[in-house]
Image (tube, rainbow, N blue to C red):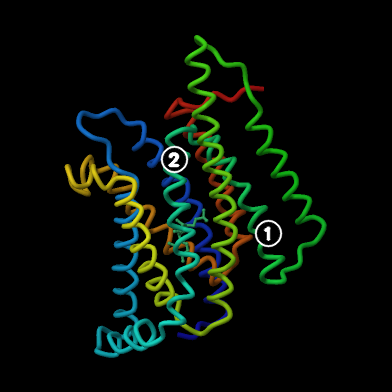
């Protein structure tokens, strides 16, 4: 499908706007879903990751059918581009594996850090994305762009600055330990986000296959890796209580928001780029910080 340049420009800004909304809602809903105290088992994050992958594949397949007016051409296209081109399809195994790891890491992070600290620290991915864009795509950044990246890093460091902990020694130890685990998870997710995003951008912009087909290829591997992760980490639980144990409305919202995020991000990477995507998502810091402070009351900013 060839789009006019004004249409592409519109898609670029609309998708960036939707990304801000989606990121803010996802981080708050995910945090809320991990801290909600309910009777019965809590839902398994590894299963939620798999559910989101399945939803993404279904939506992208539907979009391919829509593009082909629900004719037999859609089936032919899926066969020709995915089944008959195994090497092209295999290229997506790399970002899919990394994204699966990252999607699981984010649940670890949000189980151990408050929404605002998580969100601000995760913005370090702008720096990793910029570094990978320069080294893998040959992008050039001017002085002001580098300066804003350094300013961002300084901000992230300030947020992580240790504050005096209250309570007894055990409590102190536990909360510091948990902060450390959360922080390590976010830092690894930053590296993975930068690399996988730029790798996907390279594939999307250097080859001709459609965005939705590329997303189905990515999703298929994501699904396979996700299921492996689910069996390795939560196999026993899944065996006993099933994949959808602990699911409630909030869990379904998290899954839908995560799947929607994948789709919006793919559009953003195609019509804008990964660096712009990073700045768009940081806008959502301000929004989720305010909500975290006023509504969830789990974030108390110090000086
Ligand atoms: O934080 P970051 O921007 O790296 O998050 C990217 C998210 O988007 C991941 O959850 C990844 O699984 C998803 N994604 C996707 N489809 C794409 C690109 C990214 O589902 N084409």
- Quadrant hosting residue 198: bottom right
Q: Nearer the viewer, residue 137 or 263?
A: 137
Label 2, on which residue? Answer: 108
Nearer the N terminus, badge 2 or badge 1?
A: 2
At x 59% / y 73%, what residue is drawn?
202
- Residue 181: image location, x then y, percent: 51, 35
Q: Secondary structure at mark 1?
A: helix
In the rendering, which numbered label is found on residue 68?
none
Note whether 300 is above or below 67 in the view shown: above
Residue 296 is situated, as x and y percent measured from the top left of the image, at 42, 29
- In the displayed structure, 12 sits above or below 68; it is above
Disc 2 residue lies near ligand 1 with CB under 8 A: no
Residue at mark 2 to residue at mark 1: CA–CA distance? 25 Å
Instruction: Say which of 92 and 139 sits in front.
Output: 92
Side of 216 where 109 appears, left or right: right
| 193 relative to 179, above or below | below
Image quadrant in which the C terminus is located: top right
Mark identifier at residue 130: 1
- Across and down, in percent, residue 21 comes to 46, 51
Q: Nearer the viewer, mark 2 or mark 1?
A: 2
Q: Secondary structure at mark 2?
A: helix
Which residue is located at x 57 percent, y 45 percent? 122
Q: Residue at x 29, y 74 (%)?
A: 62
Q: State the count of labels.
A: 2
Figure quadrant of the N terminus: bottom left
């Amino acid at each position: 499908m060839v789009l006019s340049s004004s249409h592409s420009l519109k898609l670029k800004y609309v998708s960036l706007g939707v990304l801000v909304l989606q990121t803010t809602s996802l981080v708050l809903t995910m945090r809320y879903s991990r801290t909600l105290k309910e009777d019965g088992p809590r839902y398994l994050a590894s299963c939620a990751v798999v559910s989101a992958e399945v939803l993404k594949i279904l939506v992208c397949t539907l979009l391919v059918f829509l593009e082909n007016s629900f004719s037999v051409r859609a089936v032919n296209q899926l066969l020709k581009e995915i089944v008959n081109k195994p090497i092209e399809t295999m290229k997506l195994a790399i970002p899919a594996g990394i994204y699966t790891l990252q999607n699981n890491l984010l649940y670890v992070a949000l189980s151990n850090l408050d929404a605002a600290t998580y969100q601000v620290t995760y913005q370090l991915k702008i720096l990793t994305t910029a570094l990978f864009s320069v080294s893998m795509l040959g992008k050039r950044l001017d002085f002001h762009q580098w300066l804003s990246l350094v300013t961002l890093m300084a901000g992230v460091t300030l947020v992580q600055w240790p504050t005096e902990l209250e309570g007894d020694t055990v409590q102190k130890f536990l909360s510091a330990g948990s902060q450390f685990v959360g922080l390590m998870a976010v830092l690894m997710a930053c590296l993975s986000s930068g690399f996988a995003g730029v790798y996907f951008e390279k594939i999307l912009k250097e080859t001709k296959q459609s965005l939705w087909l590329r997303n189905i290829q990515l999703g298929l591997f994501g699904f396979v890796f996700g299921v492996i992760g689910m069996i390795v980490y939560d196999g026993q639980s899944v065996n006993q209580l099933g994949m959808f144990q602990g699911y409630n409305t909030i869990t379904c919202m998290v899954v839908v928001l995560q799947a929607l995020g994948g789709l919006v991000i793919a559009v953003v990477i195609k019509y804008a780029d990964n660096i712009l995507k990073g700045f768009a998502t940081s806008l959502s810091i301000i929004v989720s910080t305010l909500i975290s402070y006023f509504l969830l009351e789990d974030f108390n900013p110090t000086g």
